[in-house]
Amino acid sequence: MTDRFSAELMRGSLDLMVLSVLMQGPQYGYSMQQQLREATRGRAPLPAGTLYPLLHRLETEKLIRSRWDESTGRRRKWYEINNTGRARLGSQANQWLAYAECIRTLLNAVPELRPAVT
């Protein structure tokens, strides 16, 4: 399946997605884009024009920190989640899971949307 998620659907989940990727360890922008692309099977592309302002905002909100590094021969800005970001991620994840369960319950009540039993 390669259909992309709608921008409206993704808009409320971007912080959650980026913070989740950063829980795996420090990342630079392109590596985050790659991980999100792989995890979503290409359905949630996050272009640089969206990602970098989002990272700047998360840093301003003190949910992540950044540092420049040139040890690979290329100057890259690395981002890392901090304790405040971990707490926000936990809160957002719980809210998102509860919300998703509500939507699942509503959709399961619509017989036309249930998968056919064969």
Image (tube, helix red, strand yellow):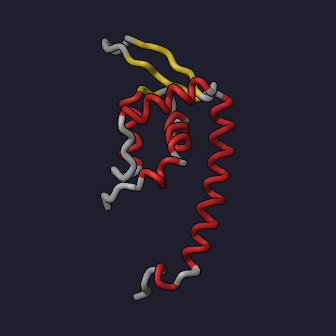
| Picture coordinates of residue 64, whole percent (x, y) | 58, 26
Taking 98 as reference, is 53 left or right? left
Give the mark count.
Answer: 0
Quarter of the figure that contains the N terminus:
bottom left
Percent of width and height locating residue 61: 62, 27
Quarter of the image where one finds residue 23: top right
Q: Is residue 46 above or below residue 115?
A: above
Direction from residue 117 to residue 58 in the image, left or right? right
Q: Compared with residue 104, is residue 93 higher up or lower down, i.e. above or below?
A: above
Position of 69 with respect to 80 (left or right) is left
Please tell me which residue is depicted at 64% across the width and 46% down the height of the picture: 92
Q: Nearer the viewer, residue 56 or 38?
A: 56
- Tell me where residue 53 appears, x and y as whole percent: 46, 29
| For residue 18, side relative to residue 47 (left or right) | right
Which quadrant holds the C terminus? bottom left
Q: Position of residue 25 (x, y in %)?
A: 51, 30
The residue at 35%/55% (across/down) is: 4
Q: Residue furthest front?
A: 8
Residue furthest out toward the bottom: 118
Query: Residue at image x 38%, y 12%?
Result: 71
Q: Is residue 27 above or below residue 70?
A: below
Q: In this rendered view, identify the residue nearer to me: 43 or 73.
A: 43
Q: Quadrant of residue 105?
A: bottom right
* Residue at 62% across, 65% down: 101
